[in-house]
Amino acid sequence: MPINRNILLAVVAALCVVVGILGYKVYEDHREPKGVQLNIGPHGISIDKK
């Protein structure tokens, strides 16, 4: 039973969307934050402007 061409294209498009969403998530997770970073540690408080 051959697969309908439209179904095949829909599956490929859905996979492309999933890969795009996952790629953007990885990009956002590894991107440097903007703004002010506040660190509280054993040596006190430090404030860094990004």
Image (tube, rainbow, N blue to C red):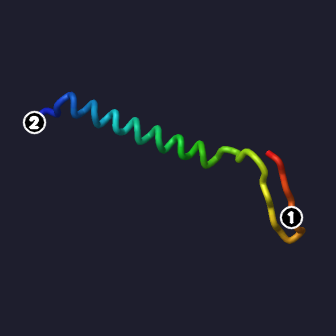
Return the disc, 2 or 1, that comes first in the chain's sequence: 2
- Residue farthest toward the bottom in the current orientation of the protein: 42
* Residue 30 image offset from top left, x and y in percent: 64, 47
Residue farthest to the right? 43
- Quick check: 49 left or right of 22? right
Q: Position of residue 26 (x, y in %)?
A: 56, 46
Q: Nearer the viewer, residue 19 or 40?
A: 40
Above-or-below relation of 7 to 46: above
Q: Describe the element under mark 1 as helix, strand or loop.
A: strand
Please give left or right for residue 20 compared with residue 49 in the image: left
Residue at (22% x, 34% y) in the render: 7
Residue 25 locus on image (x, y percent): 54, 46
* Image-based side of 16 in relation to 10, left or right: right
Q: Amino acid at mark 2?
A: Met
Q: From the viewer's perspective, tell me whether residue 6 is left or right of residue 22.
A: left
Vertical side of 41 occupied by 12: above or below: above
**In terms of image quadrants, where is residue 12?**
top left
Q: Say which residue label 1 marks.
A: 45
Q: Quadrant of the image for the N terminus?
A: top left
Tell me where residue 34 sits by quadrant: top right
Q: Residue type at mark 1: give it.
A: Ile
Circle 2 Cα neighbour tier, 10 Å, few/some/many (<14 / 14–19 / ≥20): few
The disc placed on residue 15 is none
- Most extreme residue toward the front is 35
Q: Residue at x 78, y 54 (%)?
A: 37
* Residue highlighted by disc 2: 1
Foreground of the two, 22 or 38: 38
Spatial distance from mark 2 to mark 1, Cα to Cα? 67 Å
Q: Nearer the viewer, mark 2 or mark 1?
A: 1
- Quadrant of the snapshot with the C terminus: top right
Residues packed near mark 1 inside 10 Å, few (<14), some (14 to 19) or many (20 plus):
few
